[in-house]
Image (spheres, rainbow, N blue to C red):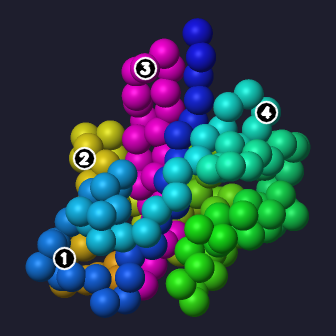
Amino acid sequence: MSTSQNMVVGYIPEDWDTGLERVCVGDPSGSRTIEVNFQFVGDKFEFPGEEMVVDGNIWNPASDFWSQVAHTLQKYFPKVSKRLNPNNLGRAYKIFTEEDNDFNGLELVAGPEDGGEFSNEEGHYNGRFYFRFESEDDGEYFDERILII
């Protein structure tokens, strides 16, 4: 049995085409967004081409661990001047794993019933990052949620 946590951090450009109305996470070309996929498997976050060992500070959003995660993810958004907030990444992860329920400043925009899509009508989330989380267990996906961070 293999269990992993699959995550996507994406960015909706400031000039995003409001005619699209919906963002389909996992389809950056169709949604005209920028995304990076990564996983938590075993004791590591696996990013494209690199790994980061997860330590006990994963539960502290203000830790250096989340600063390193934000720095690693930011490399995949070279043309985006907005910076990922490490504290928001850590807080979102705690919400996803049900270790916290403080949404202050974060917005849940999609749950398991939404199929990885959320509305961006009139460009409400343009210029913002989003964070998708889902668990996978032997090919079964569950607990998919998306937050605007």
The percent coordinates of residue 34 (x first, y second) are: 43, 69
- Work out how far the residue at label 3 is from the one at label 1, CA to CA, in angstroms: 32 Å
Magenta-span inclusion, residue 138? yes
Q: Quick one: quadrant of the N terminus?
A: top right
Q: Earlier in the sequence, mark 4 or mark 1?
A: 4
**Are the residues flagged by discs 3 and 2 in contact, CB closer than 8 Å?**
no
Query: What residue is shown with label 4?
Result: 43
Q: Earlier in the sequence, mark 3 or mark 2?
A: 2
Q: Which mark is residue 24?
A: none
Specify start and end residues of the magenta stretch as a single range: 127-149
Q: Earlier in the sequence, mark 1 or mark 2?
A: 2
Q: Given the image, on which type of amino acid does mark 4 rest?
A: Asp
- 34 sits left or right of 65 in the view: left
Using the image as rendered, state which of residue 94 and residue 121 is in the foreground: 121
Residue 110, picture quadrant: bottom left
Q: Earlier in the sequence, mark 3 or mark 1?
A: 1
Q: Given the image, on which type of amino acid does mark 2 rest?
A: Asp
Q: Which mark is residue 114?
A: 2
Determine the secondary structure under disc 3.
Answer: loop
Determine the secondary structure under disc 1.
Answer: helix
Residue at (47, 39) in percent of width and height = 134
Query: What residue is shown with label 1?
Result: 121
Q: Given the image, on which type of amino acid does mark 1 rest?
A: Glu
- Work out how far the residue at label 2 is from the one at label 4, CA to CA, in angstroms: 29 Å
- 41 sits left or right of 54 in the view: left
Q: How many marks?
A: 4
